[in-house]
Image (cartoon, grey):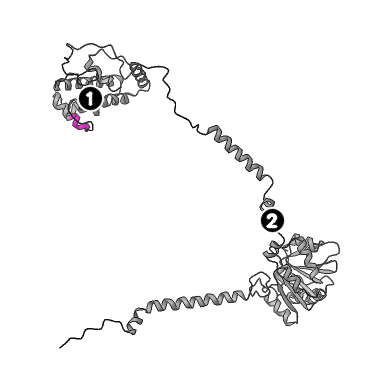
Amino acid sequence: MTATAPVLSSTPRQSLRRARGWIVLIVILLVGAGIATAIQLSLATSTLDPMGADNPAPQGAQALARVLQEHGVDVRTASTLEAARQAASERDDTTVLLSDPSGFLDAAQSRTVLGLGVDVVAVGPGFAQLQAIAPDVRLAGHPVRTASSTPGCDVAAADRAESVAGVDTAFRVTGDAVGCFPLGSLYALAQARSGDTTVSAVGAAILENDGIQKAGNAALAIGLLGSHRTLVWYLPSAADATASGVPTIAELTPGWLTPAIILLIAVVVAAAIWRGRRFGPLVVEDLPVVIRASETIDGRAQLYRRASARSHALDALRVGALRRIGRLCGLPPNAYVDQIVIAAAGLTGRPLVDVREALVDSTPGTDAEALATASVLEDLEHEVRLAVGGATDTLGRPAPEGTEPPAGGAQTPPVAGPLGSPATPTNTTRTSAYSDEE
């Protein structure tokens, strides 16, 4: 009887269960992509530009544009001067709304707008734009009073509105210009003639979605923009600035910048020549004077004494003594100080404490104490040499074979001590404590 082998392949239900997490993730991604696409499509059908005819935001003007369309006005939007020119097919029956808060248009382009319609409404114009299209109207900034219930002029649209509220921009008028809705000495609406074109200047807050319903703002806006069959809603863009010629870098650069850069380069080059390294072969020069070792020792001793550097001078003697004693005891050059101290004490029979006191621990407080410690170091080194039974030369090194130690100790001339005072005459063995270190 043959046993049936178990089935190892997964069933569709098991595969679906294992892939459940990936399926949920894919669904979430698809839903997110759909939401993002819907938002982009909604943004594509409306503009967020201030005073946009299809902008439903508080700063937009969608409400005004729809009301004008309901009154039979053909609202044509344009974002470039060329598009505005094409939209204004019949000048005698066209009104142009001009809103250029970013200042894309220059004076010549602003004056060109005057030829597109018989009425031009400048919304929130700047100083340069008013100077170009309505020289008798001056921008006065934000008024203290923001409402007025007196038209104060013979403009039909102002008479029908009777009042305005929420004014954010005021104007001054001179010459033949007319001011409406007085705010003290300023006006919420200014109107002037430029050739055969009537130019009206008004603040943006009166026409925006957030302020159109206040007082008579809607009636004023409809009266200014709905008097003709065609309304060109012109919001200049960066394309107008490009078409007029963007200033070059040379035009934007101040005149003093180029000479300053040239001067800076010249200064850097001069500094490099003045303080830079001189490349060339190394030259070996002989010393003009040969200084004897004894003079160097005397000079260093005088410096130590003048600075009262007793500890420094004594440390120099101790380093030399430790090196020579370690060599006499057969210790390696890297031997520890304690090893040298123990070896010296064992060879000389001196107490370990006294040997360590001389080689390491004592701190001189006066010149006399320093000289006494130096004398102890010489005696200790001499005793070590005698203990090992080796003859040494004047530097404490083992003498050549067959050389006898000097009988009775040969005398040497006095040598200046490390503290500046002449040392007592010593034999060659005792003097080596100074000469080898120096």
Disc 2 is placed on an element classified as loop
- Residue at figure coordinates x 75%, y 72% from the top left: 86
Q: Nearer the viewer, residue 424 or 292?
A: 292
- Using the numbered discs, state the Cα–Cα distance from disc 1 to disc 2 in whole angstroms: 85 Å
Mark toward the start of the polypeptide (1 vs 2): 2
Disc 1 is placed on an element classified as helix
Task: Say few, some or many: other residues with alpha carbon within 10 Å of mark 2 (under 14 / 14 to 19 / 20 or more).
Answer: few
Quadrant the N terminus occupies: bottom left
Amino acid type shown at disc 1 = Arg
**Where residue 124 sits: x, y (%)?**
72, 66
Q: Nearer the viewer, residue 345 or 92?
A: 92
Identify the magenta region: 333-341
Q: Single out the mark in the foreground, 1 or 2.
A: 2
Q: Which residue is mark 2?
A: 247
Tell whether label 2 touches label 1 (CB within 8 Å).
Answer: no
Q: Which residue is mark 1?
A: 324
334 horizontally vs 217: left or right: left
- Whether residue 117 appears in magenta in the rendering, the answer is no
Q: Quadrant of residue 350?
A: top left
Amino acid type shown at disc 2 = Pro
> What numbered label is drawn on residue 145?
none
